[in-house]
Image: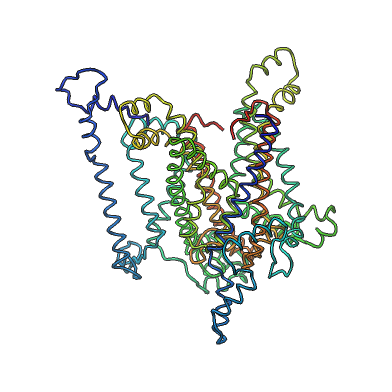
Amino acid sequence: MGLKRYTARRIAWAGVVAGVILTITFVLLDLAPDAQLAQVQFQAAASGGSAEAAAEAYARRRGLEGPLWERYLDYLGNLATGDWGWSDTRSQPVSEAILTALPYSLMYTVPAVVASTVLGVAIGLYSAFNQYTKTDYAATFVAFFGISVPNFWFGIVLLLVFAVHLGWVPVLFDAELARTRPFSLANARQLVLPVFVLGTSAIAGTMRYTRAEALEYVRATFVKTARAKGVSERRILTRHVLRPTLVPLSTILVGDLLGVVLSASYLVEVVFGIPGLGRLSLEAIRRQDTALVLGTTLVPVFVAVIGNLLQDLAYAVLDPRIDYGDR
Amino acid sequence: MAGDDVLSDGSEGGRPDEPRERFEDVDWDAIDADGRRLTNTGLAAVAAGIGYALALAYDLAVAGGDPTLDAAVDVPWRSAPATVVWDATAVDWLFAATLLAGGFALVPLARNRRLRGYYWRRFRRHTPAVIGLWYLLAIFLLGTVGTLFIDQPSLNLAATYQPPIFASVDASIPAECVGPVVDGRCHGTWKYPLGTTGEGKGLLALAIFGMRVSMQVGLIATSLSIAIATLVGTTAAYAGGWVDEALMRYVDVQQTFPTFFLFLFLAYLYGGSLFVLVVIFGVTGWGGIARIVRSEALQRREELYVEAARASGASGLSIVRRHVVPNVSNSIVTAATLNIPFLVLSEAALSFIGLGDVTLPSWGQTIAAGRGDLATAWWISTVPGLFLFATILAFNFLGDALRDALDPRQEV
């Protein structure tokens, strides 16, 4: 099977996954008790009206009448055409609310991902070349720290030390500043801690994988041959070890890093008060704005579906050993 | 945990006085008798199961809404006997079942002295993991047994914002200082060794009750996941064909949904009581373990002992139960140990953002409660976070050492 057919099959499968996930969320939404409906009924009953009539009016307003399959098709059609519903609490379309929040999230996730990837690969390579030295153990400890520390708590502790006690960075995030002058020094100062917290949780995986992958090549015969021929250590590092290491790493990075970054950023935003996607989602949860909760949950889902697709394609393109036959 | 060889089983368990016709002959009577005879462990398991069922029936039918256990117990450090009032919840029952199942799963290992010594020697090389194990044992005992003897912390306006012992804070911050006031600074007392919250709840007691919540979430949900993952993984590997394809494709879909957001979405829709959280974690978080079980089981089913069992007429079910599952249990234990810290962290994160069980003193909830007082009372958010961090770190060290001790093939 050629690469083209493989690609087509992967894309089709990604479409199926997206469809299945959307169907599952629809069923979950349909089965869940509706807090707003209960509230509407309670209000109607309290003011002497009929709870049933109120429920019917509510259902009509929310487009909840009609047979299940019709609502299901509507739901799929709306999502596909970019109509993600109306946010009651923010009085704006869900897609608009998400687009407003997105830049704030990107502002600190992009630097954190870039920094943790570069540093993680560098430290991992160093560990592999200096296995079982003190530096290697220190790096392993940093990795364990990064995996284990609850990032929301870590953020709070850092805020306590660097903002409350030392006063080096502002306690409250200034969204106006971030919006008007995103590339100013003042904005960089208030983004240092979120980038650091997100980076520590993202760097651990990269570091461990790079170390494990590079270790396979450090003792490979082709590296020994290169060394015997008098190739410099630097060239061995960049040409003979880094290159084959990057192939599996590039694929791990997409899938695993996305998961870590998506969930970590949610809590980081809550702690630092950054009005990004995570905060938007949390506000929606607190105010029972189901349309917005669904929208903000589906964004990471779609990012993950596309990330997995790119991961598989990258693997097939970069690694000639991959057999297209399976999956 | 090498596979039992049915052929040698037959010759050992068979009657030596009856001479065999030929080597290949299998003494089916001996094997049948061996299979039906109830061992002491089996007897204990049945007794425990019956006891559990009776107690559960009592709680459901007789006790009903009343507390399950209401007894006076003499505690040495109190003048009056403490009354133990314990209304067992659904989570408590699940927790008891988990501990029973886990205990009986460990019996074969505990009996085999050689194997136990071998694993312990390999495990002991990892000092952080050994320390982690003791720490987790302490947390576990405090959370399960310790919580029976202390009262759940309650609102106490006379003891708000007390600093931890050996620390001091400006005397204007607590409403009343329980400890000594020196030079206008309120010092901590042994009454509240780790300080109190803005509601006057002792942080030590809160932390101990938090241990129970974390242990319950981590252990129950993981054992649910193990059960589902083992079932799905071995079925997929053993049945093969379209069953394998369908099951693994489903796991693909489930794995694509970012786990944290799945938890978040479900907790939002169905409420975040501890029981619901445990079920959500257990029922949706088994994909990774199932994949490991499947790939391991695929290798095991090609082994000679499985072929030998099949050749001697063992059914598919008994091959899976007696040969495949015991031989993939190493990988299951490792994967499960590394699954627990993720669930503990997820529970803390969900209660931190207010989606958890508000009636239970979870660590995440206490961390959230202290956020508003960071400038004045730093200890409220930091203390429970330290416990959370140490617990997750200990489980990660433990999982890593177990992988090294039990599972040398799975090098990462």
Between residues B385 and A18, which one lies in front from this camera angle?
A18
In the rendered image, which quarter contains the N terminus of chain A? top right
Image coordinates of residue A82 in percent, x first then y, are: 73, 58
Image coordinates of residue A180 in percent, x first then y, are: 85, 59
Image coordinates of residue A268 in percent, x first then y, are: 67, 55
Between residues B52 and A100, which one lies in front from this camera angle?
A100
In the rendered image, which quarter contains the C terminus of chain A? top right
Residue extending furthest toward the top: A229
Q: Is residue A251 left or right of residue B82?
A: right
Q: Is residue A75 left or right of residue B270?
A: right
Please, is residue B177 above or below residue B298 in the view?
below
Residue extending furthest toward the left: B17
- Judging from the image, the colouring scheme is rainbow
Quarter assignment of residue B234: top left
Please, is residue A259 above or below residue A274 in the view?
above
Q: How many marks?
A: 0
The residue located at (66%, 26%) in the rendering is A129
The residue located at (62%, 36%) in the rendering is A208
Whether residue B210 is visible: yes
The residue located at (72%, 49%) in the rendering is A109
Q: Is residue B155 left or right of residue A9?
A: left
Quarter assignment of residue B72: bottom left
Image coordinates of residue B322 in percent, x first then y, are: 34, 35
Quarter assignment of residue A299: bottom right
Whether residue A168 is visible: no
Between residues A325 and B106, which one lies in front from this camera angle?
A325
